[in-house]
Image (tube, grey):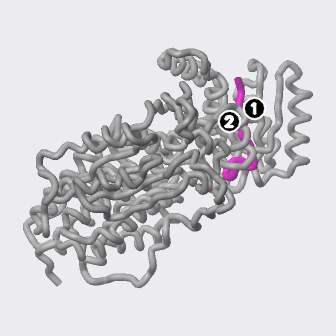
Amino acid sequence: MKINNLDSQTFATMLRQGAVQLGRDKKVINDLNVFPIPDGDTGNNMLMTLKAGCAALKDNMGTLSELASAASSGMLLGARGNSGVILSRIFAGLAKGLKDMVEADTKAFAKAMQATVDEAYKSVPVPVEGTIITVLREGAAGADACGDLTHYFETLLEAMQTSLDHTPELLPVLKDAGVVDSGGAGLLSIFRGMNDALNGNISDEEIAPTTASTPTVELDKFTENSTLEFGYCTEFLLRLMRSKVDLDSFDEAQIIDYLNKVGESVVAFREGTIIKVHVHTFTPGAILNEMQKYGEFLTLKIENMALQHHQSTNQDNASFKTPPKKYGVVTVASGEGLINAFREFGADEVIAGGQTMNPATQDFLDAFARINAQHILVFPNNKNIKMAADQAAELHKGADIHVLPSATIGEGYYGIGSIDKDNPNVEEVISSVTEIMQSVVTGMVSTAIREAEGDQVSVHTGDFVGYSGKQLLSDSPDRKTAAKALIERLGAASRDVMLIFFGEQVPQNEAESLFADLQTQYKNLEIMLNNGAQPVYDYIFVLC
């Protein structure tokens, strides 16, 4: 079957089939993890990002250009983890390459694919070859644009597969682990699904929604005797209309300036002819009337903020009556005990997430919007979460966002505790916090899912492995033995304080036994035991 032109309906079907195929391959992609513990989440992150793009297509069927832009906007806000952020930028590049097109022939689509390469490389501060960006670049370069679209996709997939197979030769860490790059594998899976749809092989499988439940509205929070203290959370997608504005010269800054004057916690950005807006206001009607001077609404949601259900205990920060404080704090953690510990240590918002469940860009935007502060300090606590936080920081307009380089729970915990909120100089505060984080050492214990060789350590499948960063430091069939060996190699004897967070799989009596043994062994070390209830990591040790 030959297809010479790609229209919006076909492209929408291709994206959805790409998500179906990625859902089938998700576990295999997760398991392409260079580290021998069950923390692989590339497949999950890419799938949730792509699902967010597919969800944005529901009410946005139009030209090919408009559909690609809608998918790009959905992925932008739904992006999770580094692989998800890069994927969102790939499809942002595709939207740019397809701009103003009703349909695209093979040569036009091939040119748009080159735009995806440019955007993907720009999204990574230090591009590393042997990763998803290599598979994309070599795939696009090796595809044949001289035939129809079906031929183009066949050659594209061949070139991407060849590139993926070659990734271990470019990255020694992949070769040592005996795997190919997981992000590249995820991208190939998506394009395989897209190719299936192009050829009419469309599955009946449903794409599950990205969220499992709808927040409960607590009606008793606003009764007939209440007063409107917090205003309305107002969100909408506005389609700019040619009949109302000159699309070529229109500057969305005038909309953003207006929103900042009449509301707070503004998040607004433009993708093509669509402007996405989030704003807190007492007068949503006035804002809606003003917006209709520029376009028409595609979606609209207005919620009384007294009724909004938030996981955070700091909802009152959204009050417009309170002047903004100097500093707000957002961090990321999983496990009830860890989340409570961060709140007690000064975090305004703790986003539930971490390894294997990276939060989306939208999660950070929502957290920023709930904090009434001039400067918001963000502690991702995971290198795979930082890109989503950075992307949210670029989008948010209601405060100055500073994403700090916290790569572990320990760095984030001590970093938050060291914030001098009385110091008006934000650069000095950040410099001091960063310096303290650099002095913190974090070690974890988890279960090995495959054999591996580390620094003086041989890891066996099913054993408990202790590590710090990407250094394998201990291994034992016994969890306590692995923990003790790890602590010794972390240099606990030369430290002053050690925090222990034990995970959801660790019995209380085992953790208390380890605690007692360590107190006996390290008499000059102040040790504190906490039930973190975190997944993935049986123990997290923080040394300072």
Q: Kindly identify which residue carries mark 2.
A: 443
Q: Position of residue 473 (x, y in %)?
A: 67, 36
Front-lying residue, 288 or 75: 288
Is 463 above or below relative to 440?
below
* Neighbourhood count class around disc 1 (C-alpha, 10 Å): few under 14, some 14–19, many 20 upward: many
Left or right: 100 with respect to 183?
left
Is 459 above or below relative to 429?
below
Residue 147 showing in the rendered view: yes
Q: Amino acid at mark 2?
A: Gly
Left or right: 150 with respect to 274?
left
Tell me what residue is drawn at x 89 percent, y 21 percent. Answer: 523
Query: In which quadrant of the rendered image does the N terminus lie?
Result: bottom left
Is 115 above or below relative to 433?
below
Front-lying residue, 36 or 23: 23
Left or right: 371 with respect to 109?
right
Q: Kindly identify which residue carries mark 1.
A: 487
Secondary structure at badge 2 equals: strand
Magenta region:
533-544
Residue 209 lies in the magenta-colored region: no
Q: Position of residue 25 (x, y in %)?
A: 46, 68
Front-lying residue, 496 or 448: 496
Q: Amino acid at mark 1?
A: Ile
Tell me what residue is drawn at x 86 percent, y 39 percent. Answer: 514
Query: Which residue is most to the front?
Result: 225
Q: Position of residue 430 (x, y in %)?
A: 52, 21
Q: Looking at the image, tell me whether mark 1 or mark 2 is earlier in sequence order.
A: 2
Residue 189 showing in the rendered view: no
- Contact flag, marks 1 and 2 (Cβ < 8 Å): yes
Left or right: 246 with respect to 66?
left
CA distance separating discs 1 and 2: 8 Å
Tell me what residue is drawn at x 34 percent, y 63 percent. Answer: 188
Secondary structure at badge 1 equals: helix
